[in-house]
Amino acid sequence: MIKAQTSMIVYLSSRITLLMLVMMLCWLCVSKYGYEFALDDSAAHYLYYDAQLVQTQQPDLPIRDEFKLITRSHAQLPDEVVQAWRAGHLPINEVSLLQHSGLDTYVLPWQQPNSNASPLFVLHFFNQQDTLPITPWLVLLLATFSLFALYIVIRSTFKINKQINSLTEFVNTNKQPGDIAKFKECSAFYEALKLSRQAEHLAQQRERLLSTFLSHEVRTPLTQIQHGIARLQQLDDLPLEAVEVLVTLEQAQYRLRDTSSAVLALWQQAAIEKQQIDIKTVIKRVAVRFDSEHFQIALKLCPHEVILALHIPLCELLLTQAIENSQQHGQSPLTIELTADALTLHNTKTTQAHSTSGTGLGTVLIQQICTRLDWHHKIISTEQDYTLTIKFKALF
């Protein structure tokens, strides 16, 4: 059964709105009760209203009912009111509350300013048995809504945390949870991550197939070329001109084999096999291929061994691309300097060299090989010099 999805904002706002509506309803009930029994200071308004009404209409006094008493005569006032008046506890034109014999009596001695007439007494009565104390109800209301709000917060937090844990489990284990689609936001993230992982899986599968295909289709003809060259070298009646051609073909075959191995290692996702070897031997072997009368290479190698975990075809491809880049950007001689933690290639630029931003294929290969070997490189190209520095460990 598919559960109906909802937005996290709608989920939270609906519960908060419901809580607020119930709280407002209860508060209106309390306010109405307080208003009816003059617990919200509305008694003063009606006392002044009655006093002004009597002053304006001049009705016959006293005015008496179960709720009020309006008079000027002390004899018609309750004893407790007379005692409070004589004791000076009832200020003129101010509302006072007297509690006596189960009654709450609001008293207003009313007198016009600059008048010598006896004050008008306006009394409103409330039976204490009918008037419940409002403070306990407010405390109860506050406690009830605090518990209700706490319940909503805890339940909502638990539900959201459960969804987040389900997503976290899916991210870490790729195991599809059962109730992932409670919130639309979580569902959208889940679907996006699922599609992303499917695309990644398909890409890796294509890379493995392509890697296997390249490995077979490249190495098979290379092996045939190697066997063909070996058979030709065993022939005794070859002309002298063919010897140089065979040597060239053999060198090209070795380079093609190493290059293909390096490219396959660079392409494959699996960890590459490395050997602990002195990098100086690799540098010397590659430098010999390019050192000539037209482009000389000066080696400044560390006197001690620099043992590194190397994938030899990748390292040779890196050095080959670095030297070819130096040939493209600069002129002879090229200085290759090796220290315990870095390799630097430096030469001066020719006047015909074009300024580049380092986005050629050789630079891209250098960057990818350094990433594959966990090395770090920096290219500094000025108007006079071209320098490539490769760090074996630390960042620049």
Image (cartoon, rainbow, N blue to C red):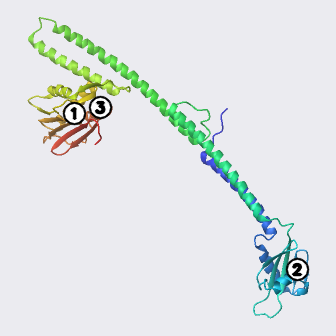
Cβ atoms at labels 2 and 1 below 8 Å apart: no
Quadrant of the image occupied by residue 327:
top left
**Which mark is first along the chain, 2 or 3?**
2
Q: What distance separates the C-alpha of mark 2 from that of mark 1?
A: 109 Å
Q: Which residue is mark 3?
A: 369
Label 3: how many residues lie within 10 Å, few (<14), some (14-19) or many (20+)?
many
Which of the two marks, 3 or 2, is nearer to us in this view? 2
Quadrant of the image occupied by residue 257:
top left
Q: Amino acid at mark 3?
A: Ile
Look at the numbered disc 3 and give the secondary structure of its residue.
Answer: helix
**Which mark is first along the chain, 1 or 3?**
1
Q: What residue is drawn where x is 46% and y is 30%?
A: 199
Q: What distance separates the C-alpha of mark 3 from that of mark 2?
A: 102 Å
- In the drawing, what numbered circle is on residue 69? 2
Look at the numbered disc 2 and give the secondary structure of its residue.
Answer: strand
**Which mark is first along the chain, 1 or 2?**
2
Which of the two marks, 2 or 1, is nearer to us in this view? 2
Q: What residue is drawn where x is 16% and y is 18%?
A: 248
Q: Give the answer, above or below, for where 334 lies relative to 112.
A: above
Q: Give the answer, above or below, for where 247 lies relative to 327.
A: above
Q: Which residue is mark 1?
A: 322
Q: Amino acid at mark 1?
A: Ala
Q: Give the answer, above or below, for where 218 lies relative to 172.
A: above
Compared across the picture, whether 176 is left or right of 377 comes to right
Image quadrant for the C terminus?
Answer: top left
Front residue of this view, candidates 211 and 135: 135
Residue 152, percent across and down? 67, 48
Q: What distance separates the C-alpha of mark 3 from that of mark 1?
A: 11 Å
Q: What residue is drawn where x is 19% and y is 7%?
A: 231
Residue 45, percent across and down? 77, 77
